[in-house]
Each structure stands twice: as structure tokens, then as C-alpha cells.
Image (spheres, rainbow, N blue to C red):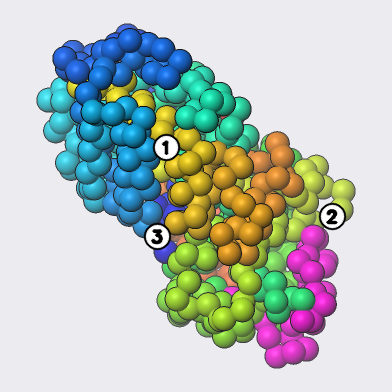
């Protein structure tokens, strides 16, 4: 369970402090792309703007980048820095790892000498609400050509800029892309003539087939019980449309009792009562439970994000052929197609306006968005970036990565994401509720009641600033 790769409280596409910034007015003038930006601009910050140097980085520049040293490490940024140094001979792109972004960099922001590029990620990321007016608008980066000569905006997947955009300002570009769905062993499914279920009725039929072979359809671990909340919420959004999401996100009364959500909860309850869930998940550590799926093959399906392959690479059966598929809808007449996906971008990169070399910070980010650097990330991390067309047909030997690209291509514009659980920090309370439900200790109706109480507690707390999510 990598901190920067988890849903809800453990990993959000939009952390609480980040999302709060969406309603905070921006202040101060933004620096131009060709200027150093802010009072911290140094003598090496300005140069001649050209097609090959769209931000006007001066020759023989020094660029200071501080990168969160988490599950993805920092070598992928160093790779891009090496690419940029080849393009800008005489310039130095310094990449410094950090595991405590806020503690290390907030004093630098306060002192007017922040780095030129920051990966504002991890448990100790800086709340963008506190520095929003000190950040460059990165729309100019998106509008620039990449190193291969293609406009960057034309190379990105649908909707990936939304998590870092506030009041029309692209304050952060989130680099890594996570796809959520069901994960399964393609080899096991092929051997048994099974296919991933497209509806909950098909899922139940598959659960009966699994039981006939002494297997389960699902399992879970106590710290990851809310992976089933992600599954249920995504399925309900696909069934009932975006209004289902918006009612939950905006803390509406009885939002957890919407018809689409009720039907998904009831479908899960049917599975629990039928014995399709492996018992004991609430007392099992989550990676141990996941190994029961990926190594022992006790269960057929596991709901998770695309980090699952890397997370379980040392505990996956040889020949498993890990593969992803979209989660089911309730009916074949759902408002969104079966192929619709919950997906979002993470690892938010920001360029402080008071950096000594603002053009250099943007240039390193442009290098990261090149096809060469994005391909390197996909190859070494077995995960896609927001840049399309960087994963070959064989997925660098990863069936999971191949399936992720297939899922994204199949979804097209039918991609959605949400903010609410990270925004208000409700995962801790929701874990208790979901563990009880999956244990068979509460009903679908009681699950909805408990989740509604958690939402209502946030909605009725005047000390919590609310965000109007659209």
C-alpha cells in the first residue's frame, strides 16, 4: 500500500488541502513564461524565447528540482533531467529527493527562495491553498510543444489536468495515471473459460462457479476494506450517472441512499450471504489478503488501483498474467457504458513563481512530458503517465500495463474521478463500517445509514470548510 498510490485517506487524486484551494481566491500577478517570475527570479532565469526554448530559459542555467522520494522514487525525474541536459548543453538540472516536502520546503517558500520544480506529493505535501498565489500557471507548459514537436495538450489523456486546476489556473500538473477496476489472473480465467463480469448478475454467476471449485469470488484485508467502497461508488456512478457522484461529493442528505448505490450495495450483500467473500478479512493485514489472491489464487477478483501489480510483484504466482477490467454495472442499460472508468492523475508537479529559474522549472517539466521520458516512466514503474502512446503493445512484458491502456482507450471520454473522501478525511471512519459489512455483521441498508451518518457529520460541522464540487 504505497502512500502515494492509495485511494481515500491513504492516497487521493486530490488531497484535502489541495481540494480546499479550489475555492480560495488567487492573489498576485503571475509571472510571464519568459521571465524569472516573482522577486526570487535570479540572473540565470531569463533567455531568448524560441520554438526550442519556449519559456526562455537562459543558457548555462542551473535548475533546482525537489522530488518526493516515495514509491516511484526519483530516478524518473533524473532521467528527464538527463534528457534536458542533452538538449540544453551547459545547463544543470539538479534533482534532490525528499520524503518531507512540507517540512523541508515551506521555510523556503516563506523565505522567497523555493525550488524551481517540486513534486508536491506524499503524506507531508504542502497544502496548495497556502501557496496557490505563489505558483505559476502551467497552461503555458501544456500549450508548448514536447521534445518530439507535438503540442503537449494533444498528447494527454482526457481530464488529467482537472485535479490541478483551480479557478481556471493550472497550478499543478499531475504526472502519474492510476486506473481503478477489477484485477484478475488472465491465465486462470482462460483455463476455466471465464470472462470478467459486466453486470452484477454476471458477477454472481461467476461467484457460484468459483464456489464450485472451492474458491471465492472476492477477499479483502482490514486496512483496504474501503477498496470495496471505491468499487461500489464507481459501479453506482456508471449505473446512475454523474449526479450520483455529485450528490455524494457535495454531502447531500440521503445521498448514500440513491437508487443506484442501493442496488450496488444489495448486490454486494447478496455475494456476502452466498459465501462469495473469503471470511476473516477484517482480521487480515491487507497485503497478506492480497497475496491470498495473487499468489494462492483463493479468490478470482480483487478491486484495486493499478499500483497493485508493482505492490504485489514479489507475491504473485508465476504465470498469473495480472489483468485489469472495468467494474460491473447493475444493468445493461446503465447511464454510462460498462467501459467507463474511475481514473485520475497523481504526483502533482508545481513551479513556484519565486524560484530562481522559473523557465528552467517549466523546461524540466516539459522534458518529463516528452514521449521519451514518459515511456521511461511506464517501462520502469509499470504504470502509465498522463501522456498517451508511451506503452508498447506488449506493455514491456506486463499484462497489467497492457490492460490499463486497453481500458483507457475503451473508456475514451467516459472517465470520472472524485475528491470527497480525501477532501474530508472520512476513510478512517468508513473503514470500520465497511469491515463490518464485508464480515456480514451489517446489512446493505445499515451500510448506507452508517455512511450517511459519516457524511452528515461533515456536512453539519461548521468548522469544516465545504467545497462545491462540480
Spatial CA distance of label 1 from label 2 is: 41 Å
Query: Which quadrant of the rendered structure holds the N terminus?
Result: bottom left
Spatial CA distance of label 2 from label 3 is: 34 Å
Within-10-Å neighbours for mark 3: few <14, some 14–19, many 20+:
some
Given residues 210 and 424, the one toward you in this image is 210
Q: Residue at x 63, y 72 (%)?
A: 321
Q: Residue at x 41, y 48 (%)?
A: 425
Q: Which residue is mark 1?
A: 368
The region drawn magenta spans 191-219
Instruction: Please check the rendered image and state whether residue 376 is part of the magenta-colored stretch, yes or no.
Output: no
Query: Which quadrant of the rendered structure holds the C terminus?
Result: top right
Within-10-Å neighbours for mark 2: few <14, some 14–19, many 20+:
some
Within-10-Å neighbours for mark 1: few <14, some 14–19, many 20+:
many
Expressed as whole percent of the image width and height from the top left, the position of residue 428 reads 41, 58
Q: Which residue is mark 3?
A: 2
What is the secondary structure assignment of the residue under circle 1?
A: helix
What is the secondary structure assignment of the residue under circle 3?
A: loop
Amino acid at each position: 500500500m504505497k502512500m502515494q498510490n492509495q485511494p481515500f485517506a491513504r492516497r487521493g487524486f486530490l488531497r484535502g488541502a489541495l481540494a480546499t484551494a479550489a475555492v480560495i481566491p488567487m492573489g498576485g500577478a503571475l509571472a510571464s513564461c519568459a521571465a524569472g517570475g516573482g522577486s526570487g527570479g535570479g540572473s540565470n532565469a531569463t533567455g531568448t524565447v524560441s520554438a526550442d526554448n519556449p519559456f526562455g530559459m537562459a543558457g548555462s542555467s542551473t535548475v533546482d528540482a525537489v522530488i518526493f522520494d516515495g514509491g516511484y522514487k526519483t530516478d524518473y525525474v533524473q532521467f528527464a533531467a538527463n534528457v534536458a541536459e542533452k538538449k540544453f548543453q551547459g545547463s544543470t538540472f539538479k534533482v534532490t529527493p525528499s520524503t518531507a516536502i512540507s517540512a523541508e520546503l515551506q521555510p523556503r517558500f516563506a523565505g522567497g527562495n523555493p525550488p524551481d520544480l517540486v513534486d508536491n506529493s506524499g503524506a507531508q505535501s504542502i497544502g496548495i491553498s497556502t501557496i496557490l498565489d505563489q505558483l505559476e500557471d502551467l497552461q503555458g507548459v501544456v500549450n508548448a510543444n514536447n521534445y518530439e514537436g507535438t503540442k503537449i495538450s494533444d498528447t494527454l489523456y482526457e481530464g488529467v489536468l482537472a485535479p490541478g486546476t483551480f479557478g481556471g489556473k493550472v497550478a499543478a500538473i499531475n504526472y502519474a495515471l492510476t486506473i481503478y477496476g477489477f484485477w484478475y489472473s488472465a491465465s486462470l480465467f482462460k483455463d476455466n473459460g471465464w470472462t470478467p463480469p459486466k453486470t452484477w448478475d454476471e458477477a454472481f454467476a461467476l461467484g457460484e462457479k468459483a464456489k464450485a471449485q472451492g474458491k471465492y469470488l472476492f477477499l479483502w484485508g482490514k486496512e483496504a476494506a474501503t477498496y470495496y467502497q471505491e468499487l461500489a461508488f464507481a459501479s453506482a456512478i456508471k449505473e446512475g450517472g454523474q449526479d450520483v457522484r455529485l450528490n455524494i461529493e457535495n454531502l447531500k442528505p440521503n445521498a448514500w441512499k440513491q437508487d443506484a448505490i442501493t442496488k450496488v450495495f444489495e448486490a454486494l450483500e447478496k455475494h456476502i450471504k452466498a459465501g462469495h467473500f473469503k471470511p476473516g478479512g477484517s482480521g487480515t493485514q491487507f497485503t497478506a489478503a492480497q497475496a491470498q489472491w495473487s499468489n494462492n489464487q483463493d479468490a478470482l477478483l480483487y478491486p484495486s488501483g493499478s499500483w497493485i501489480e508493482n505492490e504485489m510483484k514479489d507475491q504473485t504466482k508465476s504465470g498469473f498474467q495480472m489483468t485489469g477490467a472495468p467494474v460491473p454495472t447493475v444493468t445493461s442499460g446503465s447511464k454510462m457504458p460498462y467501459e467507463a472508468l474511475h481514473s485520475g492523475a497523481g504526483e502533482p508537479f508545481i513551479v513556484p513563481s519565486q524560484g530562481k529559474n522559473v523557465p528552467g522549472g517549466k523546461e524540466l517539466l516539459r522534458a518529463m512530458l516528452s514521449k521519451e521520458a514518459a515511456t521511461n516512466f511506464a517501462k520502469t514503474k509499470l504504470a502509465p503517465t498522463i501522456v498517451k502512446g508511451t506503452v508498447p503493445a506488449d506493455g514491456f512484458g506486463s499484462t497489467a500495463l497492457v490492460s490499463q491502456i486497453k481500458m483507457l482507450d475503451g473508456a475514451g471520454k467516459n472517465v470520472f474521478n472524485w475528491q470527497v473522501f480525501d477532501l474530508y478525511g472520512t476513510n478512517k471512519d468508513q473503514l470500520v463500517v465497511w469491515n463490518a459489512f464485508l464480515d456480514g455483521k451489517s446489512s446493505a441498508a445499515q451500510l448506507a445509514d452508517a455512511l450517511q451518518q459519516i457524511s452528515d457529520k461533515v456536512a453539519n460541522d461548521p468548522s469544516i470548510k465545504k467545497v462545491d464540487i462540480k
